[in-house]
Image (cartoon, rainbow, N blue to C red):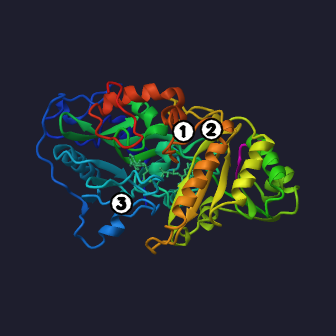
Amino acid sequence: MQDLSRRDLLRTTAAVGAGAVAFPGLLSGGTPALASDGPEWPAGAKHPPATLTGRIVRPQDPGYANASLGWDELFVRYPLVIVFAQETQDVVNALAWARQHDVALRVRSGRHSLEGWSNVDNGIVIDVSELKSTQIDPAARVARVGAGLNQLEAVTALAARGLAVTTGTEGSVGLSGATLGGGFGFLTRYLGMACDNLIGAEIVVPVGADGAQAIQVDLRTYPDLLWALRGAGNGNFGIVTSLTYRVTPLNSVAYLQATWDGLDNLTGVFDTWQRTAPFTDPRLGTQLEIHRSQILLFGVLADGSEAEARALLEPILSIGNPEVTAQTGGWGDIYAGFQIPTAAEPANWKFFSQFTNDPFPTKAISVIRAFMADAPTDDSNFFTQAFGTGAQTREPVGGSAFPHRRALFYSEPGAGWGTRGVPNSGDAITPIAQAWIAEFSQALRPYVHGAYVNVPNIGMAEWETAYWGANFDRLRRIKARYDPHNVFQYEQSVPPASC
Ligand SMILES: Cc1cc2nc3c(=O)[nH]c(=O)nc-3n(C[C@H](O)[C@H](O)[C@H](O)COP(=O)(O)OP(=O)(O)OC[C@H]3O[C@@H](n4cnc5c(N)ncnc54)[C@H](O)[C@@H]3O)c2cc1C
């Protein structure tokens, strides 16, 4: 880990385009213009032939299968080549190469795409997971990190300096993928969405007819792109190579877990949770997880004591006779402590994301109970995260594409099945799990108000507005400015306004 001095930091943010990598002769001075328009380049300009650089893995190489495998083994792809970038220039070269050879491309960081969209048959995967730099300025409360950190690495690095930023709960998820789609977790009500704390990024975008260029994005330079990266940045505009966050001091947290056996208390627990947890002290983040035969409540109270956490959760804990455990400690240690090793998780997963603005009526809670009692496996669950009156209600300076500011809570039915490393082990359950998710989410449709782009709903008709609401039109205009040729496209990518 390397510290970034305040002077370095000021130099970095002041020098517009510093670190930008342009093809020689492409731009006057080699840096993009200071404007809210896209990078300026001669529209039809051809560029010198690009060569792939970095750690390159092709199908004939040992390790190709592992290099290609995503976290969700339901999806198997056969890319033509995988480039593990070692520096920004490798990403610039890979993007230019893909354009010059007319090869489909995908961007990848933590490999947790829940539809396998960070990989592609016959195409190039531009993987940033080996960009692991960490530059932290505790005095300025700013951290600039490589786009390859996973969430556990980011939490650990920041916690070592007594700092934190919002992340999701699963440590192996890529910080890039989570932040660029929004990013919520236990600290959301306290610090806002992960994307709300994103104040800058380095991103490689297409330029001219067949080139690529790295640009620095912040509130002054390409502010429209910063807005778009805050909630719609996943594989839509370019390849993010570093992320700059505003970070917050966090000394310790109280972590509490409550377990109710069976589902008999579900109505009371769920209803009390949805009527209290979203409105409680914003330092308290909670997740309720309903399984086939138990209900789990997890709470993290930032800078608070175990006694405070118990008191805030008392309305829920007083229902039935839950087993309750609690501990206080540094956020890095607590976060690392509740991780489940990937090897111990099922191989295949399917989720359906939903935001909800009004409390679920008893009828909806009964739907959850009926479906969970009939869940395809023990690993399947109905997951929720409290939102409500927390910090995520406030847009960051400069705004964000993430629209779900009024949500009471987020939820998702999720099915997990099959054994990692055992090919076809889940095949018999696959159609059952898929049907269960489809029917479960359909039954809850009357009670939900939108979906989460980071947990994409593949069958959803109006996914554009479900993910981004009224922001979709602006996203299309920004897309037309930065990626007019629609180089970055996949099943649910933002099309340019002109298409
Ligand atoms: C087990 C599990 C738990 C989760 N828990 C949470 C949670 O608590 N909170 C939450 O908010 N979300 C959660 N998610 C959703 C998670 O945020 C998304 O799956 C996220 O997009 C994964 O990012 P990744 O980098 O790991 O995945 P990847 O598969 O590498 O990428 C995901 C998407 O982001 C794009 N992308 C990745 N890196 C870049 C980059 N550098 N530049 C541009 N585009 C990029 C990819 O092209 C792809 O479209 C969870 C997912 C899983 C599987």
Q: Is mark 3 within 8 Å of ligand 1?
A: no
Where does label 2 land, which residue? 392
Q: Percent from the top left, x then y, of residue 269?
A: 81, 52
Range covered by the magenta-colored residues = 280-289
Q: Secondary structure at mark 1?
A: helix
Q: Main secondary structure of the magenta part?
A: strand
Q: Percent from the top left, x then y, of residue 263?
A: 79, 59
Q: Secondary structure at mark 2?
A: helix
Relative placement, left or right, of 71 versus 17 is right
User: From where the camera sits, is residue 249 visible?
Assistant: no
Where does label 1 land, which residue? 196
Q: Is residue 339 above or below residue 220?
A: below
Q: Which image quarter is the C terminus in?
A: top left
Disc 2 crowd, CA 10 A, few/some/many (<14, 14-19, 20+): many
Q: Earlier in the sequence, mark 1 or mark 3?
A: 3
Q: Is mark 2 within 8 Å of ligand 1?
A: no
Q: Percent from the top left, x then y, of residue 421?
A: 45, 74
